[in-house]
Image (cartoon, rainbow, N blue to C red):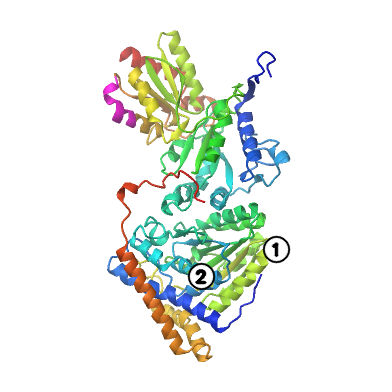
Amino acid sequence: MNDKVHLDHEHVRDLLTAMLRIRRFEEKCFELYQSEKIRGFMHLYDGEEAVSVGVIEALEPKDAIVATYREHGQALARGIEMNALMAELYGKQEGCCRGRGGSMHVFDRATRFYGGNAIVGGGLPLAVGTALGDKMLGRSAITACFFGDGAVDEGSFHESMNLASLWKLPVLFVCENNLYSMGMALERAEAETHIARKAAGYSVASAAVDGMDVVAVEVAARRAIAQIHATSTPYLLECQTYRFRAHSMFDAQLYRTKPEIETWRKKDPVRQLQAWLEQSGMLHADEITGIEADIAAEVGAAVAFAEAGTWEPVEELERFTIMDRVPQ
Amino acid sequence: MSAATGTPAPRRMTYREACKQAIRAAILADPRVFLMGEDVARYGGCYAVTKGLAAELGEARIRDTPLSENGYVGAGIGAAIAGMRPIVEIMTVNFSLLALDQIVNSAATIPHMSGGQFAVPLVIRMATGAGLQLAAQHSHSLEGWYAHVPGLKILAPATVEDARHMLQPALDDPNPVLIFEHVMLYNREDELEPSITGVDIVSAKIRRPGRDITLVTHGGMLFKTLEAAAVLHEEGIEAEVIDLRVLRPLDMATILGSVARTRRVVIVDEGWKSGSLSAEVAARIADEAFYELDAPIRRVCSREVPIPYSAHLEKAALPQTPAIVAMARGLVKGG
């Protein structure tokens, strides 16, 4: 297992591209929400891109992912097509879930992407299960389970950490600690605010990492995954991050101050990486312009794809409520 | 073996033993099947269903869990999605409420919500019902709640034969299937015909034919209802007893066919009346067979109280044979 990160030109370009794809995709989503093309609850990932990109960079295709309702970043980083994701947000049947799930419930069989879970903490037991299943079936895959700091308040976090440790299951628990569970500040919700420390209560190894630094996240994730494979035990990686935008599209943000947001914006993971790459000469401005142009074209194409998409016939409303077979 | 015919003789066994044999056979038949739950391995199961199985099948296939209902039920869902065929045992339906999130928000939704990309081929077994003086946190009959939820299949085996043979088709089903075992049935004995190798998980069964009135019931109430039918027979009233067996989806064809013949119906359910499975059955009969009826649809259900500890109060809270007899007699004689 390779736990080293080689910061060659191709790799840093990939990291920046992956984060920019998420950022630009979601900027378009925000616009589309304003123009009522996208409805329902939508939770943007602005500011947290380094977490999903850094962790997923360290995963292999055989690995599984369980994510939350704020999962556009994970979905794109994992390789779910932008077209299918945008069509899903439009509610079109060309979407990855035929428009049944929407923003909060992205699933993709091809990439072992098991949601998109909108019950806080709901994904953690599922991740224990996919890891248990993989282990019993003799696969060497791990499950990466993303969740926020709010999930740590839930019993399912504690039950799942214990189960995964007790049964020696290959789960990488990734806490995206953005300091707020909706409007509830971490220090107002948790008596112990150092989330990584909680792992000790379950004999689980853990680390906290700067979640605004994609390279640091990738290094930490590779180290964690190497340890999971070497010891057949789970690992908790706390990624300290921040969301720049509101919790969802219905949030007046009364619970935090503008100076606080501005302070964190200075740590913007995309701008930080981009500035470093330009200063160090690893990536020229022209190249970044090219990346941006490619992404703009991809986002434009995704919007066109979603616009041209079709509605699932109402006659199919009940389809898949009860399955007639297990998809293979 | 019967020397005369060469066919295996019926074997007498308890409902508990039938559940155990079903689990054992399923695990031996398919390497993807395993059972997990609280105290299922070394303790042998809180109702002794899995006693001895861990020693034979190993603790990976008969897996003890910590007291984390939401955690291990969710793990069962995840393992099912990953390719296993888990059987999750929950001690009682009251405890299943700690796992309600995973059952209702994940198991029941993921196939539809994912646009059919994933099925959840999972079986969850649990004890239900009252009668052992276990009071208000171990005695309720909440299977009707689960029967409310699209995406789930709900079974209530009442006979030894069903206890033995409903598990395998439940495991073969690509959907989450919940099996409710009434606590008063575990010690019941019956003959099991070895020639029967499979039973369906789609239909209700007429356990006693009759022309005068239909009694619809399931699970632990089946035998009180059959007793009531025997009493009614002595009085010259022939009651037809339907065992629902499957609480979701309901086999309305069997119910409506019976009601069309008898024109009278009493629903016997250990659940409470308000917002219940018995209310659903009654509403559907009213919808679909109103003009077949010669009398109002009646119900005999538990009293609307938490089930109490004291034996006389517990008995008073639950549907009893005399109440079923009285309700049926009143409909036939008065109707």
Q: Which residues are magenta?
A: B283-293
Q: Quadrant of residue A248?
A: bottom left
Q: Classify mark 1: residues with Cα within 10 Å, few (<14), some (14-19) or many (20+).
A: few
Measuring from the top left, give residue A297's x and y in whole percent: 37, 76
Q: Main secondary structure of the magenta part?
A: helix
Residue at x-position 63% and y-position 47%: B65
Which element carries disc 1, helix, strand or loop? helix
Does residue A176 appear left or right of residue B190 in this picture?
Answer: left
Residue A23 showing in the rendered view: yes
Checking the image for residue A52, the label placed there is: 2
Q: CA distance from mark 1 to mark 2?
A: 24 Å
Measuring from the top left, give residue B34's x and y in whole percent: 62, 44
What residue is disc 1 on? A231
Decide which of A69, A230 is in the foreground and name it: A230
Checking the image for residue A312, the label placed there is: none
In contact (CB < 8 Å): disc 1 and disc 2: no
Decide which of B274, B16 is in the foreground and name it: B16
